[in-house]
Amino acid sequence: MNLGQTVTSNDGTTIAFETSGSGPPIILVASALSDRSDAKKLAALLALHFTVINYDRRGRGASGDTAPYSVEREVEDIAALVQAAGDTAFLFGSSSGAALALEAAARGVAVQKLALFEPPFVVDASDPRPPADFASHVDELIAADRRAEAVTYFMTKGIGMPAAFVWLMRLMPPMWSNLKAMAPTIAYDVAVMGDKQQGNPLRGDLWDSVTVPTLVMNGSKSPPHLRRAATGLVEVLPNARYRTVAGVNHGAVVTAPKKLEPTLREFFRT
């Protein structure tokens, strides 16, 4: 494993990453309130077959940050990593990281294959979705440096986590401190998701350019609305297939990497 590596993104921001393994390169794109530590176990499994690039998205871990934020800047971060990997790579993203990976492919980053686990689009008006003022309230909490409140609000109102679970997380100081440190980046993931959590069918014209082989996955233990999001995305992408991963839920990258890895390995090796 090669630790402590960096690339410089187009706007001068330093992006930290580590590499492990050998073979075709895979870049792991983290979800909201996650850094590369969340994917360490999955990276180790994939590194038996691939060169794995596990990075801290901007504003997290050892990576830098530059205001003002835009989704385009995060796409440029991925492009810089792809260039460092040899000018082409596979991408795997989970949750909002899946939406960001898809956006990178749509904006012309040299992606060879794309694997997406449960991008949290909301494609049916009956499905749970964030409040109408979700983005503005997140911005208010972050501007006031009310980080604990921002994390709690995102987890309960943004992703529907029971308040009792969040309360338990607050009793684990190292974890809670790390989440609070990343709180400002909640707004980044809100921007990545844009208007695609309002209960409307996905528009295929947004991703007409994504012609690379794409695997869209969801977990068998995840809520039905995430399955609808995954199948809805497959319907509008030019070259996509769908797969349910047995025995996992939305947190599979952290909680069940051994169950997720075989599906990724099969897709990237064929």
Image (tube, rainbow, N blue to C red):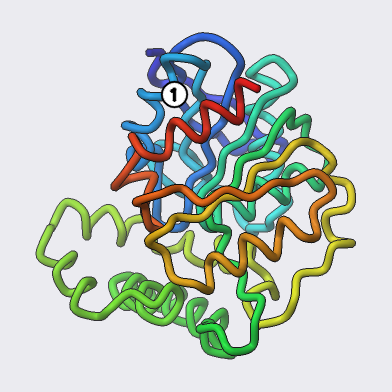
Whether residue 222 is situated above or below residue 113 in the rendered picture: below
Whether residue 57 is situated above or below residue 166 in the rendered picture: above
Q: Is residue 112 left or right of residue 1?
A: right
Residue at position x 84%, y 49% in the image: 238
Residue at position x 51%, y 51% in the image: 244
Q: Is residue 263 left or right of residue 76?
A: left
Residue at position x 36%, y 39% in the image: 259
**In the foreground, 96 or 150:** 96
Q: Is residue 243 left or right of residue 72?
A: left
**In the foreground, 83 or 166:** 166
Whether residue 24 is situated above or below residue 258 in the rendered picture: above
- The residue under label 1 is 46
Quadrant location, the C terminus: top right
* Place of residue 245 in the rendered image (x, y in percent of width and height, measured from the top left): 46, 48
* Place of residue 27 in the rendered image (x, y in percent of width and height, measured from the top left): 56, 30
Image label count: 1
Quadrant location, the N terminus: top left
* Place of residue 210 in the rendered image (x, y in percent of width and height, measured from the top left): 82, 45
User: In the current view of this chain or complex, which residue is farthest to the top?
Assistant: 22
**In the foreground, 243 or 101:** 243
Mark 1: give few (<14), some (14-19) or many (20+) Cα within 10 Å.
many
Residue at position x 51%, y 55% in the image: 218
Under mark 1, the amino acid is Leu
Q: Is residue 111 left or right of residue 108?
A: left
Whether residue 24 is situated above or below residue 171 in the rendered picture: above
* Place of residue 48 in the rendered image (x, y in percent of width and height, measured from the top left): 41, 14
Which of the 4 quarters of the picture holds residue 162? bottom left
Q: Secondary structure at mark 1?
A: helix
